[in-house]
Amino acid sequence: MSLHDAFARITPYELSFPDLEFARSHFQAIQSEAEARSADLRDPSGFVMLAAAGEALRAIRGPEDDPALIKQYGSMLYHAFHFFAAGEPLYLIEAAVLRDLTRRDPVDPDWTPGLEPPAGYAQLPQHMVWVRAEADAPPESLDGFFWTRSGDDRIELLLALGMRGDRPGLSVVSLAELPLGDVAGWSALAMREGRREGGEDFASTMPGAELERLIEIRSVGEALKLAARVLWRVERGPVPAPVAPRKATSGTPRASALAYRRVAAVEAVT
């Protein structure tokens, strides 16, 4: 088993708060306030208006942080809360699975995701997928993405980028308020409208990309295409029972403290 697949790494959910108990206590307070006010926690704009959500935002923002980043903090808090409320479902996508999903489109065009659980985090192989958040910006490694059902027929996605051992924090890119019924069509849409001039979707021109078999995302269409295929694979299964968190050894990435489910190649699952 490659290092990419050995264990789940620390997640953006864990990295965004001082510790898990801190996060869980704030999220319990948000739940209690929402119940008392009969608030719809799935509505992102209503979620951030809760007093307990405001307290959590103030707690995680640093005193020197740019106020312009408040929207990113709000998106991260929204997805982290729903990840918590769904039971912290973490899926580790093996390298062979991801490469297969980027080579072919296995998604049934009539498929609509059930989104059970209604929120979760898909962790991709470390440093295998790279994203240019802006056209002229250097690419950043895509750790994975959160998904959250934001309504009966809506889904929100949040990409987590730039998680590195040599610096704190991360970057996030929100893909908000997308129709659930369109998920299966994202692959075809990306193929028509997200295709690059003179190249294939997911192809990388980064130095060493061919040797490392790197994947690069340069458009929203490519991001949606990848997310649709991963969600299809997670829902299609088979996905085994949760694996207990594993302590990483020296010289390896920092391990997550959360239990996780391994999404392996179908032929490897018995």
Image (cartoon, rainbow, N blue to C red):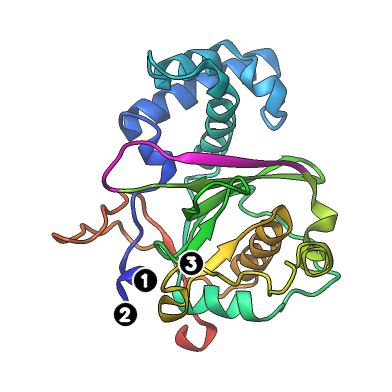
Q: Which residue is mark 3?
A: 206
Nearest to the observer: residue 112 or residue 116? 112
Q: Nearer the viewer, mark 3 or mark 1?
A: 3
Nearer-N-terminus badge (3/1)? 1
Asked if residue 174 is among those painted magenta in the image, a careful observer would answer yes
Q: Which residue is mark 1?
A: 5
Q: Nearer the viewer, mark 2 or mark 3?
A: 3
Q: Under tag 1, what secondary structure?
A: helix
Separation of residues labelled 3 and 1 (CA atoms): 23 Å
Nearest to the observer: residue 169 or residue 90? 169
Quarter holding residue 65: top left
Separation of residues labelled 2 and 1 (CA atoms): 6 Å
Q: Are marks 2 and 1 in contact (CB under 8 Å)?
A: yes
Q: Under tag 3, what secondary structure?
A: loop
What amino acid type should be assigned to the residue bearing mark 3? Met
Q: Under tag 2, what secondary structure?
A: loop
In the rendering, at what x and y percent does residue 182 appear? Answer: 84, 57
Q: Is residue 80 above or below residue 124?
A: above
Q: Is residue 197 above or below residue 160?
A: below
The residue at the point 63 percent across, 80 percent down is 103
Q: Which residue is mark 2?
A: 1
The residue at the point 41 percent across, 76 percent down is 212
Number of numbered discs visible in the structure rendering:
3
Nearer-N-terminus badge (2/3)? 2
Which residue is most to the top? 51
What amino acid type should be assigned to the residue bearing mark 1? Asp
Asked if residue 26 is among those painted magenta in the image, a careful observer would answer no
The crowd level at tag 1 (other Cα within 10 Å; few <14, some 14-19, many 20+) is some
Magenta stretch, residue numbers: 165-177
What amino acid type should be assigned to the residue bearing mark 2? Met
Which residue is most to the bottom? 267
For the N terminus, give its image quadrant: bottom left
